Amino acid sequence: MKLDVNALRYLTKDDFRVLTAVEMGMRNHEIVPAELIGRIASLKHGGTYKVLKNLLKHKLVHHDSSKYDGFRLTYLGYDFLAIKTLVNRGVFASVGRQIGVGKESDIFEVGTEDGTVLAMKLHRLGRVSFRAVKSKRDYLRHRRSFNWLYLSRLAAIKEFAFMKGLEEHGFPVPNAVDCNRHCVIMSLVQGYPLLQVKELPNPDTLFETILGLVVRLAEHGLIHCDFNEFNIMIDDDEKVTMIDFPQMISVSHRNAQMYFDRDIECIFKFFRKRFHLSFDKKEIECDDSDVELGGSCRPQFSDINKVSGVLDKELEASGFTRKDQDDMEKFVDGDVEEDLGSDSGESEDADDTAQHINDATLSGFESLSLTKEEGDNLHEGDSEANQNILRQHTSNEARQSSEMAWEDRQVEHHDSSADDNSEEEEEEEHDDDPELEKRLTKQRQRAIQAARGRRKGITSRNSYKDKGGKSSHNSKIQKQLGSW
Ligand code: ADP
Ligand code: MG
């Protein structure tokens, strides 16, 4: 399965100017009026409509004329904006096949000029959420604008900042290379998710290494919150790499203990089931002196010496602000009660679907030799004039109120067509590897199915168990309103 980036090479600077204008308009419009796009893009000779037609043809924007003539970015449009920026920065030069899929992310191989293969994670926080709001009419009453761009970008910024911070403190994580919009570039892990590992010569040793990681994280002030066999990669030498950080929280979070215990429980449960480890002795709670894991006790949150709130502060300095953290935590908090007592270790039947393909070569990569046009393009957030256009546009009260009314209807419309839209947007080129394609499709279906039933949001995004509980997703969304 490939991300079809072919069109990227043929897009002109006007195409990108208009695409960026749509992106900017989406800060306060779910569907951006065509006229506003024209004003933001302010192409020298007009012609925004013609450009929009071209973007539509390539499925980079979606047209909606139910209330007025308007457009929104598709996932692909947002992907293109991020990819173009990163390619122009020289971060990578080609895009290869898809190597992973979560319920709210897609992971691809990308190749650098010198032939190194990296991993590109595209966050898709709206993928499931849009469907979720279908049955959550409540939130519409207070909504201003729920925006998947904002949430996906936030997840990427956080993941990048955490990966970098953890790496600097010697944790086994991928090397964080760069980040733009909803896209994180990191080193490719040469290994397999623990989920796929059927036999181990020494499961006890690996078990203790992994538990030791949860403890060391807490000592540094952090809890992973989705520490399970999907997010722990193992290589042939049993070296462990942990991945997937958007849901991490501080040990000072009000539900820290619950999340810590849940991470620990996931590991116990998986090793018990998969490797038949017996924890009769291990599960006896130990006293303070044993927290270092003599290998024979279950780590207790209260026993851990959480010395370093330092990492939180460092992370803040790295671009992930306090407000971002608050926003993310609110989003996570909405699911907290849902998650109590849950487990994500029930994954036996998902084994064969989470196949990770590791034979990274550059054959089959779409090379992207783009002309550097950054200077001519609009930049998200950097044009005072465009900020003014946006402000003026939204300060028009009469218009705004009609838009608000429209927006509410629009979301319903959006919801009911969410499945169609995502089909259309997720339409990808399924070539060279039908086996991989089948596996990934199955994997995504399971992930989305699980998410639909369980509404865990980013709290446990790789947990495939359908708990079927009632969701508090709308409260999460409400808390996000107006953040854009
Ligand atoms: P999600 O947040 O959607 O769960 P993850 O970051 O866990 O996304 O990635 C999903 C899958 O993609 C992983 O289970 C793994 O198989 C693969 N993957 C993610 N990051 C990398 C990486 N850096 N190298 C190799 N494979 C990766
Ligand atoms: Mg994951």
Image: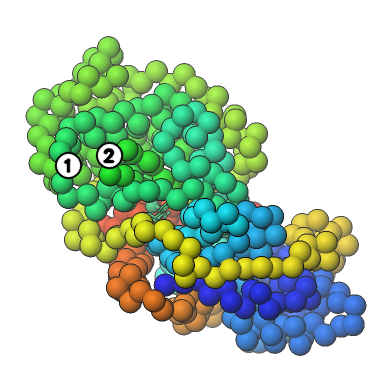
- In the foreground, 423 or 122: 122
Does 384 sit above or below residue 423? above
Is 453 left, or right, of 269 in this rendering? right
Residue 207 is left or right of residue 184, and the answer is left
For the residue marked with disc 1, what is the amino acid?
Leu
Q: Quarter of the image holding residue 463? A: bottom left
Decide if residue 77 is in sight here. Answer: yes
Is the Cβ of the residue at disc 2 closer than 8 Å to that at disc 1?
Answer: yes
Question: Which residue is at 58% across, 54% downward?
Answer: 114
Circle 1 Cα neighbour tier, 10 Å, few/some/many (<14 / 14–19 / ≥20): few
Q: Which residue is mark 2?
A: 238
Label 2: few (<14), some or many (≥20) within 10 Å?
some
As measured in the structure, the alpha-carbon distance from the residue carrying label 2 to the one carrying label 1 is 9 Å
Taking the image as shown, residue 233 lies to the left or right of residue 118, namely left
What's the residue type where badge 2 is placed? Glu
Residue located beneath label 1 in the image: 200
From what the image shows, is residue 452 above or below residue 275?
below
Per the image, label 2 sits on a secondary structure element best described as loop
Q: Is residue 474 visible?
A: no
Residue sitting at x 46%, y 38%: 249
SS assignment at label 1: loop
Please, which residue is most extreme toward the top here? 289
Q: Locate ligand 1 by image quadrant.
A: bottom left
